[in-house]
């Protein structure tokens, strides 16, 4: 596949992973901007967001973004009707599975490795709850 054709899908995957991780990202950004004085409040914010309905709402928004993005992607490539989808079934299924798999893996790495390491490095008390412990 041509890299020019996959660029919209790469952006879609990255944006959906960032959206799904918005329960933890604001805390990291807050501490980076405000310094160590915001650590307790930022930790409480991430706990409030992560352990509530907000996390699942963010997952739903991310899933909706991926679904809508795939519809737009295929419509721009001439797959507009159900007959077109049936005709291009293999391409549609393979692309959809690849995008969802990439989005989940990107989210897991971004949220549970990168953000967690950065959060611990700037002083957030996430080390005890890190997945590697």
Image: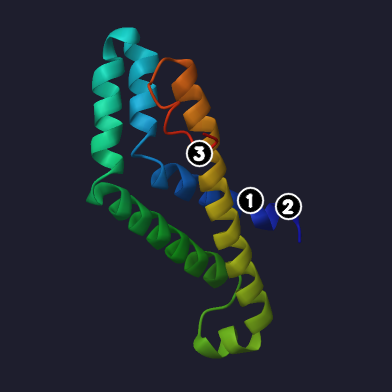
Q: Which residue is mark 2?
A: 3
Which sits in the foreground, 52 or 61? 52
**Compared with residue 124, is residue 24 higher up or lower down, i.e. above or below?**
below
- Find numbered disc 2 in the image and state the secondary structure of the residue it sits on: helix
The picture quadrant where one finds residue 94 is bottom right
The local crowd at label 2, few if under 14, some if 14 to 19, many if 20 or more residues have their Cα within 10 Å, is few
Which sits in the foreground, 62 or 128? 128
Q: Quadrant of the N terminus?
A: bottom right
Q: Which residue is mark 3?
A: 131
- Find numbered disc 1 in the image and state the secondary structure of the residue it sits on: helix
Instruction: Report the residue at 52% width, 52% height from top.
Output: 12
Q: Which residue is mark 1?
A: 7
Q: Answer whether labels 1 and 2 touch (C-beta < 8 Å).
A: yes
Residue 115 at x, y = what percent? 48, 31
Instruction: Report the residue at 63% width, 68% height from top.
Output: 95
Cα separation, mark 1 vs mark 2, equals 6 Å
């Amino acid at each position: 596949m041509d890299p020019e054709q996959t660029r919209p899908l790469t952006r879609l995957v990255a944006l959906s992973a960032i959206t799904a991780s918005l329960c933890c990202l604001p805390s990291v950004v807050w501490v980076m901007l405000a310094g160590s004085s915001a650590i307790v409040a930022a930790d409480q914010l991430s706990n409030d967001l992560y352990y509530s309905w907000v996390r699942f709402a963010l997952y739903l928004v991310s899933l909706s973004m991926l679904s809508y993005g795939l519809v737009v992607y295929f419509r721009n490539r001439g797959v507009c009707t159900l007959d077109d989808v049936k005709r291009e079934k293999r391409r549609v299924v393979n692309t959809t599975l690849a995008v969802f798999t990439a989005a989940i893996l990107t989210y897991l790495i971004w949220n549970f490795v990168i953000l967690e390491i950065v959060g611990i490095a700037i002083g957030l008390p996430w080390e005890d709850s890190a997945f590697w412990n």
